[in-house]
Amino acid sequence: MSLTFLTSYILIWPIISLAVLAVIVGATVRDYLHSKRTGRDIV
Amino acid sequence: MEEASLHQFSIATVLLLLLAFYGGTYLLTLCIKKKNEDTDAFMVSNRSIDFGMGAASMTATWIWAASFYAAATSGYTYGISGPLHYGMWGALMILFIYPFGRRFRKLAPNAHTLGELIHARHGSSSQLILAGSNILGSAISLMVNFTAAGALVSVLSPLPFQAGVIIAGVGVLSYTLWSGFRASVLTDFAQLVAMMTIAILIIPAVLFAMGGPSELMANFDRLTPEQANIFSKEAFLKQGAPFFVAVLAYSIGNQTISQRLFAVREDHIKPTFLTATIGYGGIVIGLGMIGLMALLAGVEPLDGNMNNIIPQMVSLYLPAGFIMLFFILVIGSLSSTADADLCALSAIVMADIYGKNIAKNNPDPRKMLFIGRLTMIVATTIGIVLASLALDILVMLVFVGALWGAIVFPVIASTFWNRVTDKAFAWSVILAVLLFCVVRFSLIPITGVVGVFFELVAAVGGGVVIGLMAFGFFGRTVGFVIGTLVACVLAYFCVGALREYTVLLASLTAYGVSTLVCVGMSLAADQRFDFKKINERVRDYDTPTMEHQS
């Protein structure tokens, strides 16, 4: 097993988490702004 | 080998952290505008949850405290492939349910629980089998999460175990009681953001604080050949395969998932569940890597308890502030799952027990809401009492797993195949659970012809698992062909070998028996069901029926 593989294998998961977090937060902010405009509750 | 001690907080610090977490969460729920809930909002948020909130809620709910501990344990025990064999299959549970979830929504757009759909299809007895398994599963989950809170508080502070259990129970109940599912989803979002941020920080922080990847590489010879192999057979057979078999069982048997399937906007189901799959995998596999790092660093679990691995690693390599973050990570994960369990239990009692069986599909919505809130209070009390008693729940867990495995095929077949009869549903589940128990508890010796019989049934079960997954994504023909092929291949390899893996053999037996009995009895009966009746029978309880109005 190479050093590069081990580094990537461990660090890929927080990077994936970061990407998912960005997608979820971005979508929720958009939904929140939309719900404010339309006057409905976000949940 | 190193054995690090755990960082200790003062009582005041822990109480302040818990107060900040639960107080903040409670204040967040005050943002919910509509103060007077109706039953639909209380159970499924009027089925209008958008993508972001839905994905956050699904991910947060599916991550419980045990996810981190078990993933790290898997990494520590099985090495390189360990975290994958915990986190990947757990993530796939979310992925494989969504094609079936879309079918459930199409058949019963007004449903709040899967039990209501089964009631409309097969009547009370089948519904109560499903509802009973859901209640047991959620009650156990609630107890396990409160236990995790007690354990965390007692290992990181001088506070007793019971104090952690009670604070977590009262804290979760306080913010969930009034708005139910809507509060659960809203707080899941905040909890997930906190959990993900903390996980994103902790994983690289531990890695670089212990000397970086080169330090790990230098210790690589500490791994056994199996631990160093990413395709480890041992890790697959002992950790991955039993989990893989449970993939569909957990998602069908768990009302917390069904509730979200019924709550997310119908056009958002696919992206929501796909995102939750990736999110869950990222966090859980990532934290499982801390177990692998502990193994490479030669850290011994404190008191031989594998649950101490992550807090030990954080205590050993990171400053005290990170221990606080870890504390919030665990409290967030257990609270998000516990509030989902409370909502699941209340929905089952409201809809499946009161709505369908006591009020005979014509309930009083106000009484229904009262029953839902009362259920939450009773469930929390039971969860706190059982957690405080620290009972051994292994047998109960095994039984619930059997029940969930046994209902997968009958539930899915009942929603796609119009020939499944009520008797076929009930008997297939009962016989599958009985034969599961025979294998799991070795009630008779699994040798000779008996062993071969169970291995062949288990091969059918394996074909059913893979066939159903293929069916969900690619349709009936592909599912049937792949399932049959897998069953044939497994029959060749399983006979004479699978009896050594009792847990796997028993789980696959449950799938195999339920499928064979369900199909056999249904074909023999030659009945046809009109799926349109399901929508007519599953109703929105807030809209009065003609009968009720008159």
Image: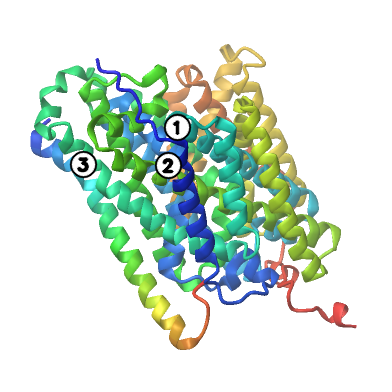
Sequence order check: which comes first, mark 2 or mark 3? Answer: 2
Q: Is residue B217 above or below residue B149?
A: above
Q: Is residue B35 visible?
A: yes
| Cα separation between marks 1 and 2 | 9 Å
Q: Is residue B33 above or below residue B19?
A: below
Q: Nearer the viewer, mark 2 or mark 3?
A: 2
Query: Which residue is located at x 49 percent, y 45 percent?
Result: B334
Seen from the viewer's position, the closer of residues B194 and B412 is B194
Seen from the viewer's position, the closer of residues B338 and B533 is B338
Which quadrant of the view contains residue A20? bottom left
Q: Which residue in the protein does label 2 denote?
A: B13
Q: Is residue B481 visible?
A: no
| Cα separation between marks 2 and 3 | 23 Å
Q: Dot 1: what SS?
A: loop
Seen from the viewer's position, the closer of residues B151 and B439 is B151
Query: Which residue is located at x 65 percent, y 39 percent?
Result: B384
Query: Which residue is located at x 48 percent, y 47 percent?
Result: B18
Q: Which residue in the protein does label 1 denote?
A: B157
Mark 2: give few (<14), some (14-19) or many (20+) Cα within 10 Å: few
Q: Amino acid at mark 2?
A: Thr
Q: Nearer the viewer, mark 3 or mark 1?
A: 1
Q: Dot 2: what SS?
A: helix
- Image coordinates of residue B56 in percent, x first then y, are 42, 60
Disc on res. B205: 3
- Image coordinates of residue B307 in percent, x first then y, are 42, 28
